[in-house]
Image (cartoon, rainbow, N blue to C red):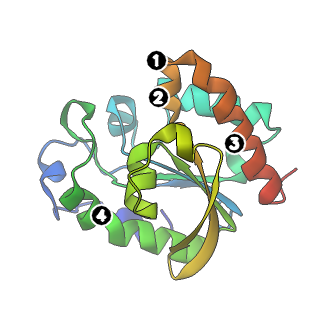
Amino acid sequence: MSNADADLGCARCRLSETRTQVVPGAGDSSAALVFIGEAPGRDEDLKGAPFVGRAGKVLDGALAHAGISRDMIYITNLVKCRPPSNRRPKDDEVEACARHLEAEMGAIHPKIVCLLGQTVARNLLGCDSDMKSLVGKEFPLSIGGKKVRAFVAYHPAACLYRRENVESLRETVRRCTEAAGLR
């Protein structure tokens, strides 16, 4: 996570009680394209890095399909600690961690942000629309003190359970890479 380093000893919310470690964002600290997921899972909590488990392999596949690699982007999450049983983060947990995400985005200054999943879209865009109506669409977003273009994509973990969403994820990732000038 840049110099704002997700306060590796953070205890601002209840997630600190059950995590193994804080999972900061990773990648190019001056990336034009940032992917924001929901929260670390079991593998991420153990390894201390975002998207390193099964969902990470789906994301890596979508990146490869778009002709880019992880070293060209930055990947982070709404919350930096794993929720128990991989449940969705609660609103107060997202709020407690918001300063870390804001600091990351303020330091990176991305051009494009890809919001992975409904929880991320709901929290950052403030909308309760269903995923089918959000996926692949572009929205204006102010984050880290800067206006960026945001695209909504299916979360890679959702693609593990609904393989029919993989093509949509790939297409949205491709659109994000083009919009960020990476292709």
Q: Are marks 2 and 4 in contact (CB under 8 Å)?
A: no
Q: Secondary structure at mark 3?
A: helix
Q: Residue at x 50, y 20 (%)?
A: 160
Of badges 4 and 3, nearer the viewer stands 3
Residue 3 visible (yes or no): no
Find residue 149 and report its horizontal and vertical position in percent: 65, 66
Query: Label 3 to label 1, Cα distance in Å?
Result: 18 Å
Give amino acid for label 1.
Tyr
Q: Are marks 2 and 1 in contact (CB under 8 Å)?
A: yes
N-terminal-most mark, 2 or 4: 4
Give amino acid for label 3.
Thr
Of badges 2 and 1, nearer the viewer stands 1
**Mark 3 sits on what residue?**
172
**Mark 2 sits on what residue?**
157
Which picture quadrant has residue 140?
bottom right
**Mark 4 sits on what residue?**
97
Find residue 6 and report its horizontal and vertical position in percent: 36, 64
Q: Residue at x 53, y 24 (%)?
A: 159
In the picture as drawn, the residue positioned furthest to the right comes out as 183
Q: Is residue 129 left or right of residue 7?
A: right
